[in-house]
Image: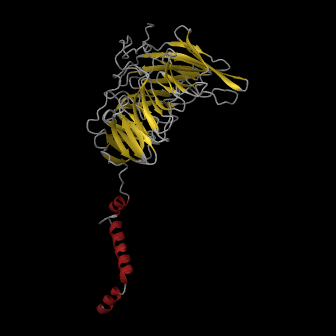
């Protein structure tokens, strides 16, 4: 009988032996004796490097990120139904919790994470390193997060709302203001205000720069009117209803009134800057198209393109111009065929007319600072720490100093640029994210001082009586009426 069994087993062949082995492994795994499957799956599903050169660390997060923000020494990853924090140094997970939305406020030294649930009032402020709750609110319907301020709004009724301003880690509001509404419904984090819309770029996240300093004035749209709020004091300076052919925006400490009139088969444009404190017109320009109209009867449905204190316009001859929102000056007028890729109130990145290079310009002196080769499909973005350029065929991400063009890092990768910090940036593809540190000697000039308002004079400005940092080269960021 033993001889028969031996020969029977020998007759199984290779497939038979493999089948018996698989049955044995299944039995061992089912009884808890030994389970090799998790390790086997990890080996099969092992992550490939998402860039060359390789990143400092690479991790797979729980879901496809909605947003990624560098907050001090941590990386905050917002997903569809949860938020997690990871160490900027190692990429290891520090904490995780359920949340429908998350937004970072504060600067490099005092960041906090606001989290909440959709259709539920209130929010919590978390410590980025530990996830501990620093402050809890049960009534707010909307939250706006900035580098030096956090705003929230709570409404007793649809037409009875209170807007409050907080320091990122403050426990008492700096001021409160009354608003007759803030839109309708529950709005979660950073609902739209009347300002500018940034130029977009493929493979560069729209929030790559992280939170910015709060502007001196904000425009809240309520029931077809615009309420202009001074962010230093909470005063409501203007309550304006736009005219029939008008669109309003608050940029650079001014209320911009933009008109688009249909006549002779075309649209005629004009823009003026109004001092919200007294309602007087400060400057005016005609014939500049701010790309607010959709050419269906010249109806203006969009905010003007721009960033911080500047707006982008198109002259009648097709050339793009950067306009100072405070005084209406032309900070830059492009040449024929040039295309603006990115702009803030210090620099502009321009694609050359022959589409073979990207040019970095400094607006305060209106001259080219650097030029580097680039393809005709290159995209770009400006952040306080670096200018990021995305190229196709081959796919690359490049970070350079905005003022000098000095290369900080160049990656061969199809990943997206998700967040930029003082020492490096986060890139990602699908659920994989990784941290890239600037190369040797790749430190960058610091951004405006903590609490400084955007657009402050990079060479130093007047001290701000409101404690918000530099007043800017024209004192446009101060609220003393000077």
Which residue is more in the foreground, 268 or 417? 268
Residue 192 visible in image: yes
Q: Quadrant of the C terminus?
A: top left
Q: Position of residue 234 (x, y in %)?
A: 47, 15
Quick check: 365 left or right of 224? left
Between 468 and 17, the one nearer to me in the picture = 468
- Asked if residue 446 lies left or right of residue 416, the reply is left
User: Residue at the location (36% across, 48% down)?
Assistant: 51
The picture places residue 472, in percent across and down from the top left corner, at 40, 16
The quadrant in which the N terminus is found is: bottom left
Total numbered labels placed on residues in the image: 0
In this view, 268 is above or below 1: above
Compare residues 434 and 34 and report the one nearer the observer: 434
Residue located 26% across and 35% down the image: 441
**Does residue 249 appear left or right of residue 456 in this picture?**
right
Residue drawn at (45%, 14%), measured in percent from left and top? 476
Q: Is residue 418 above or below residue 279?
A: below
Residue 88 at what x, y percent from top left?
31, 39
Q: Is residue 413 above or below residue 46?
A: above
Q: Position of residue 201 (x, y in %)?
A: 49, 38
Residue 93 position (above or below residue 109): below
> Residue most toward the right?
264
Q: Is residue 84 visible?
A: no
Q: Residue 268's image quarter?
A: top right
Which colour scheme appears in the figure?
A: secondary structure
């Amino acid at each position: 009988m033993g001889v028969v069994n031996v020969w029977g087993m020998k007759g199984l062949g290779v497939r038979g032996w493999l089948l018996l082995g698989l049955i044995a492994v299944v039995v061992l795994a089912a009884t808890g004796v030994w389970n090799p499957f998790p390790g086997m799956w990890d080996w099969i599903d092992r992550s490939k490097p998402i860039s060359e050169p390789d990143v400092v660390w690479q991790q797979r997060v729980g879901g496809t990120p909605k947003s990624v923000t560098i907050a001090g020494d941590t990386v905050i990853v917002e997903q569809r139904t949860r938020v997690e924090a990871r160490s900027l140094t190692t990429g290891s997970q520090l904490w995780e919790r359920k949340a429908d939305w998350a937004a970072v406020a504060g600067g490099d030294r005092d960041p906090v994470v606001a989290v909440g649930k959709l259709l539920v009032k209130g929010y919590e402020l978390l410590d980025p390193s530990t996830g501990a709750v620093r402050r809890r609110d049960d009534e707010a319907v909307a939250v706006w997060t900035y580098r030096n301020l956090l705003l929230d709004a709570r409404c007793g009724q649809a037409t009875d709302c209170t807007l409050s301003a907080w320091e990122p880690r403050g426990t008492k509001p700096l001021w409160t203001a009354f608003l007759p509404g803030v839109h309708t419904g529950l709005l979660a984090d950073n609902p739209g205000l009347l300002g500018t819309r940034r130029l977009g770029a493929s493979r560069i996240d729209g929030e790559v720069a992280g939170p910015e300093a709060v502007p001196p004035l904000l425009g809240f749209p309520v029931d077809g009117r615009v309420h202009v709020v001074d962010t230093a004091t909470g005063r409501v300076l203007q309550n304006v209803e736009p005219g029939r052919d008008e669109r309003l925006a608050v940029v650079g400490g001014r209320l911009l009134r933009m008109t688009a009139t249909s006549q002779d088969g075309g649209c005629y444009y004009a823009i003026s800057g109004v001092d919200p404190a007294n309602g007087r017109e400060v400057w005016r320009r005609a014939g500049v198209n701010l790309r607010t109209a959709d050419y269906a009867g010249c109806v203006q449905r969009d905010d003007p393109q721009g960033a911080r204190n500047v707006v982008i316009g198109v002259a009648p001859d097709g050339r793009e111009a950067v306009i100072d929102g405070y005084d209406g000056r032309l900070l830059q007028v492009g040449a024929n065929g040039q295309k603006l890729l990115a702009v803030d109130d210090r620099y502009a990145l321009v694609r050359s007319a022959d589409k073979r290079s990207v040019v970095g310009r400094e607006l305060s002196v209106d001259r080219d600072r650097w030029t580097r080769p680039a393809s005709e499909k290159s995209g770009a973005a400006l952040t306080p720490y670096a200018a990021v350029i995305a190229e196709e065929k081959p796919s690359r991400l490049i970070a350079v100093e905005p003022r000098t063009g000095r290369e900080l890092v160049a990656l061969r990768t199809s990943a997206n640029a998700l967040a930029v910090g003082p020492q490096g940036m986060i890139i990602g593809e699908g659920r994989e994210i990784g941290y890239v540190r600037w190369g040797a000697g790749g430190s960058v000039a610091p951004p405006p001082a903590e609490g400084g308002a955007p657009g402050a004079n990079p060479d130093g400005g007047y001290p701000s009586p409101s404690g918000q940092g530099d007043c800017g080269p024209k004192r446009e960021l101060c609220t003393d009426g000077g």
